[in-house]
Amino acid sequence: MIRQLNPDIENEVLKQRLEQMWESDAYQCFGLLKKDTLIGLIGCWTFTKLHSGKQLELDNVIIDERIQSKGYGKLFFNFIADWALKNGYESLGLNTYVDNDKSHKFYFNQGFKILGFHFQKILTTK
């Protein structure tokens, strides 16, 4: 399922990064099951930010592409929001790829707002 969101990253690199993420106390992952089949994943990071307080930062949000637009994403997000409230979080945050228009519509429908731009610089030793 991670491959659906990250098709251009080699399997070994994905595996190494996931192992590093699991080692962090600030990371956790939720799965959405339909019967005994995994149909969704949301990785989460805990941060405290000046502008939003204790925030659950959603990362690698995936609903299996074969069953998208059937209400599972909304169900999953409602669960995450309820869980976050019960666990003392003040906000949810996330990033999404600029060209992923379908996700933008979904996030707007879930009450998310665009606050700014996310900038990144890849560091190399060259």
Image: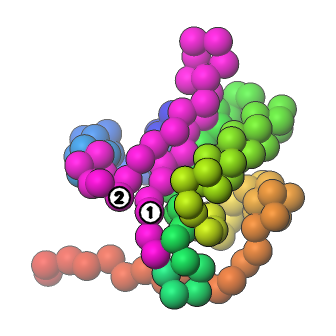
Identify the amino acid type marked 1: Thr
Left or right: 24 as drawn, with respect to 81: left
Q: Identity of the amino acid at label 2?
A: Ala
Q: Which mark is residue 46?
A: 1
What is the quadrant of residue 63 in the picture?
A: top right
Q: Position of residue 1 (x, y in %)?
A: 51, 34
- Residue drawn at 57 percent across, 12 percent down: 36
- Tell me which residue sits at (43%, 80%) in the image: 120
Is 44 inside the magenta-drawn segment?
Answer: yes
Q: Is residue 49 above or below residue 101?
A: below
Q: Which element type, helix, strand or loop, lies under badge 2?
A: loop
Q: Residues within 10 Å of mark 2 (few under 14, many from 20)?
A: few
Is residue 17 visible in the rendered image? The answer is no
Q: Label 2 near label 1: C-beta < 8 Å?
A: yes
Residue 94: where, in percent of width, then height?
Answer: 59, 65
Magenta stretch, main secondary structure class: strand
Front in this rendered view, residue 88 or 118? 88
Region in magenta: 21-48
Magenta span contains residue 45: yes
**Label 1 crowd (10 A; few <14 / some 14-19 / many >=20):** some
Q: Is residue 2 visible?
A: yes
On the image, the x and y values in percent for residue 85 come to 64, 56
Quadrant position of the C terminus in the picture: bottom left
Q: Work out whether residue 48 or residue 21 is closer to the camera in this orientation and state it.
A: 48
